[in-house]
Image (cartoon, rainbow, N blue to C red):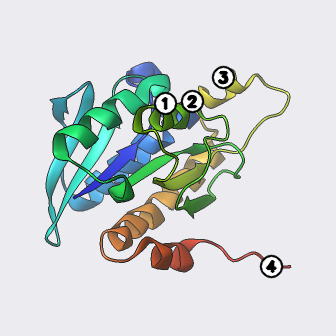
Amino acid sequence: MKLIVGLGNPGRSYKNTRHNVGFQMLDAIAAAKKIKIDKKKYQSLYYIGKWNEETVILLKPQTFMNNSGMAVRRFVDYYNIAVDDILIIYDDYYLEVGDYKLKASGSSAGHNGLKSIEKNLQTTNYKRLKIGISRQPDMLLSDYVLGKFSKAEAEKIKELEKKVVAIVEHYLQYDFEKVMSIYNEKSTY
């Protein structure tokens, strides 16, 4: 069983904000699979079903970003999901808009949703798909991440949706190291 979590905040006022890019990517995956993330349990919206003989849960915690870990923990406990079978999709302001990076583990790097997940799971060893939202150094971080993408930025994020769908398809078929080797950009020195 695989748990794929998109991080964001519930409610219309947060729709299409930088901090909700995890929700947006989950919606793109659902649209590609022609499914709906509309079941409710443990303060979350979710979908559960079989894809290529693998049970998959798509999860959108409705606890607000800073308490995302509570919802993730409840699903992990209820469905007895191994931490190794969790993929978290979230916004990362250290990456440029439209860029992404897969990581097998790591720190929260100050991201409150990840801090909550780490606190509730008592580990940093879960898989991540970081979606770049860039940053604005002269703007308060909370104002920036809760702001909307510009038209040009929104187009880049929309373009990235197809790649994220492909990444998730491969994540369900292959070892994560192989998925990272396929999709992470190689640095040039």
Taking the spot 55% from the left edge, 33% from the top edge, the residue there is: 115
Which labelled disc corresponds to residue 188?
4
Residue 135 showing in the rendered view:
yes
Around disc 1, counting alpha carbons within 10 Å, would you say few (fewer than 14), some (14 to 19), or many (20 or more)? many
Report how far apart the C-alphas of labels 1 and 3 lie in the structure: 17 Å
Report how far apart the C-alphas of labels 2 and 1 lie in the structure: 6 Å
Taking the spot 44% from the left edge, 24% from the top edge, the residue there is: 67
Around disc 3, counting alpha carbons within 10 Å, would you say few (fewer than 14), some (14 to 19), or many (20 or more)? few
Q: Dot 2 corresponds to which residue?
A: 112
Disc 2, disc 1: CB below 8 Å?
yes
Residue closest to the far front: 122
Residue 44 higher or lower than 93, as above or below: above
| Residue 92 in picture, x, y percent from top left | 63, 45
| Residue 48 in picture, x, y percent from top left | 16, 49
Amino acid type, label 4? Thr
Residue 98 higher or lower than 145, as above or below: below
| Residue 22 in picture, x, y percent from top left | 45, 43
| Residue 64 in picture, x, y percent from top left | 43, 23
Q: Dot 3 corresponds to which residue?
A: 142
Q: Nearer the viewer, residue 103 or 146?
A: 103
Report how far apart the C-alphas of labels 3 and 4 lie in the structure: 33 Å
Badge 4 or badge 2: first in the primary sequence: 2
Disc number lying in front (3 or 2): 2
Amino acid type, label 1? Ser
Badge 1 or badge 4: first in the primary sequence: 1
Q: Is residue 50 left or right of residue 124?
A: left
Report how far apart the C-alphas of labels 4 and 2 lie in the structure: 31 Å
Which structural element holds mark 2? Answer: helix
Q: Dot 1 corresponds to which residue?
A: 116
Around disc 2, counting alpha carbons within 10 Å, would you say few (fewer than 14), some (14 to 19), or many (20 or more)? some
